[in-house]
């Protein structure tokens, strides 16, 4: 039966299914707002595929071991906070995409003057 198991539990406003759908909507809305703010302030925004960024070592690029909050690379011995290591990998992916830096006037469709 369609809709079965999608009822909100007692004391909850929405079902887990509805909450999941709403989270996608909130993400899209936040991303749209961020894009508008970046355009207003002439800051470039680019998406980075996060695949593998939490597993790769930021120092040598080899696959490391992530346990809870800690990241350890068995090849080079790099020890770091797991989130910091992943953030550095995302930053490096962003920089190598060649879109790093503030927007120039040529990148905007809006005429200046
Ligand atoms: Zn390493």
Image (cartoon, rainbow, N blue to C red):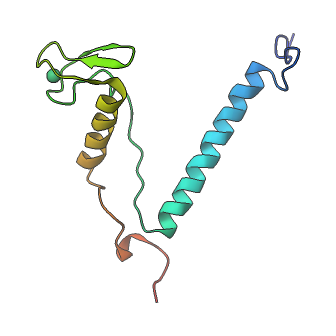
Q: For this rendering, which residue is in front, 3 or 96?
A: 96
Q: Position of residue 66 (x, y in %)?
A: 32, 15
Q: Quadrant of residue 5?
A: top right
Give the number of callouts. Answer: 0
Residue at image position (61%, 40%) is: 27
> In the rendered view of the protein, which quadrant contains the N terminus?
top right
| Residue 100 drawn above or below residue 28 | below
Residue at 51 percent across and 69 percent down: it is 40
Q: Nearer the viewer, residue 61 or 4?
A: 61
Image-quadrant location for residue 61:
top left
Residue under the image location 34 percent in, 72 percent down: 104
Q: Is residue 32 above or below residue 22?
A: below
Residue 14 vertical position relative to residue 27 in the rendered view, above or below: above
The one of 2 and 88 positioned closer to us in this rendering:
88
Q: Does residue 3 appear left or right of residue 35 in this picture?
A: right
Residue 34 on image: x %, y %:
54, 54
- The picture quadrant for ligand 1 comes to top left
Q: Is residue 19 above or below residue 105?
A: above
In this picture, residue 108 sits left or right of residue 57: right
Residue drawn at (48%, 61%), measured in percent from left and top?
A: 38
Q: Residue furthest bottom?
A: 113
């Amino acid at each position: 039966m369609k809709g079965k198991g999608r009822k909100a539990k007692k004391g909850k406003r929405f079902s887990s299914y509805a909450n999941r759908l709403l989270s996608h909507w909130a993400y899209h809305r936040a991303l749209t707002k961020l894009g508008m703010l970046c355009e207003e302030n002439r800051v470039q925004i680019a998406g980075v595929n996060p695949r593998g960024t939490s597993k790769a070592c930021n120092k040598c690029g080899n696959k490391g071991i992530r346990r809870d909050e800690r990241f350890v690379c068995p090849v080079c011995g790099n020890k770091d906070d797991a989130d910091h290591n992943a953030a550095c990998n995302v930053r490096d992916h962003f920089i190598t995409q060649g879109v790093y830096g503030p927007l120039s006037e040529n990148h905007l469709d809006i005429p200046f003057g």
